Amino acid sequence: MIDINQMARIVDEAARSAKAIPQLSNKYSYTLDEAYAIQSASFQRRIARGEKQVGIKMGFTSRAKMLQMGLSDLVWGRLSDGMLIEDGGEISVKNYVHPRAEPELAFLLKRPLEGPVSSAEALAAVEAVAPAIEIIDSRYKNFKFSLEDVIADNSSSSGYLLGAWNDPTPDFSNLGMLLEVNGRPVQIGSSAAILGHPARSLAHAARLATQSGQSLNTGSIVMAGGATAAYALNHGDYVRNVVQKLGHVSFSVAS
Ligand code: OOG
Ligand code: MG
């Protein structure tokens, strides 16, 4: 028998102290359901410290991300208000193990989404869409993990940034997305790389959240997943995700 709370404490403390840990699967054998239970228990520790859940993030929704990490199943994680970094803000690498940035899109819901829904139904629940960046930071050594390990570790989620909210009515299914560092492109992609249409990611988010007894409510935020491979951050980087028609969002890494 594994101890869910004990494992949740291990990943939560690794995140808080920014110290890498060995993969949980080196020592324990556990299932996907148990991995999500560890994620939930670890997130509860954040809630107990006063953070609030604001939504969820999807992962491995693009080929580029699947290839980079060698995993091809969709994963999801939980987002808290405490994980939000202001647009234009600064982070410090010392608060992370080995942070990476991903160009993403975020959705804001205008009504709840529950259970299996089509992407058209998912889209109809969207109040607004924004250019976004996720900061992922696996707590595992060398950024290496099994599917269960990454899920237990909140699917590597560490922080997120939201740009200005846009009306979702104009078609955003194939917009250029450019991840720039210090003015130079480091990753170039399209919103179409996210499951062919980012609204599909939202539909999966609704299905998976409901399956786990989570709810996507009015006002929930859903991150659709990286459109390109993630970029490993360095001291002094100025990182910007520029999304055609939707605008941009940026942050700096202290030097
Ligand atoms: C897992 C998280 C993947 C995405 O956008 O695909 C993810 C990882 O790559 O560490 O956030
Ligand atoms: Mg991501």
Image (cartoon, rainbow, N blue to C red):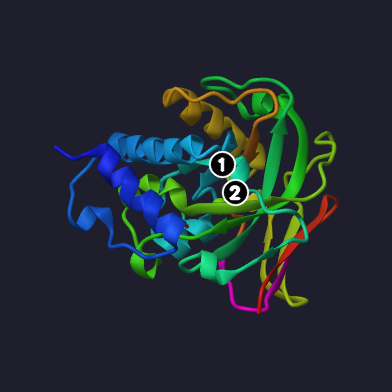
Residue at 37% in and 70% down: 142
Quadrant location, the N terminus: top left
Q: Which residues are magenta?
A: 229-241
Give me the C-alpha separation between circle 1 and circle 2.
Answer: 7 Å
Looking at the image, residue 220 lies above or below residue 151: above
Disc 2 designates what residue?
A: 83
Residue at mark 2: C-beta within 8 A of ligand 2: no
Q: For residue 79, which numbered disc appears in the image?
A: 1
Disc 1 is placed on an element classified as strand
Q: Position of residue 223 (x, y in %)?
A: 62, 43
Task: Give the mark toward the camera: 1 or 2.
Answer: 2
Q: Are marks 1 and 2 in contact (CB under 8 Å)?
A: yes
Residue furthest left in the image? 1
Q: Residue at x 59, y 77 (%)?
A: 234
Side of 213 where 61 appears, left or right:
right
Q: Amino acid at mark 2?
A: Met
- 20 shown above or below 6: below
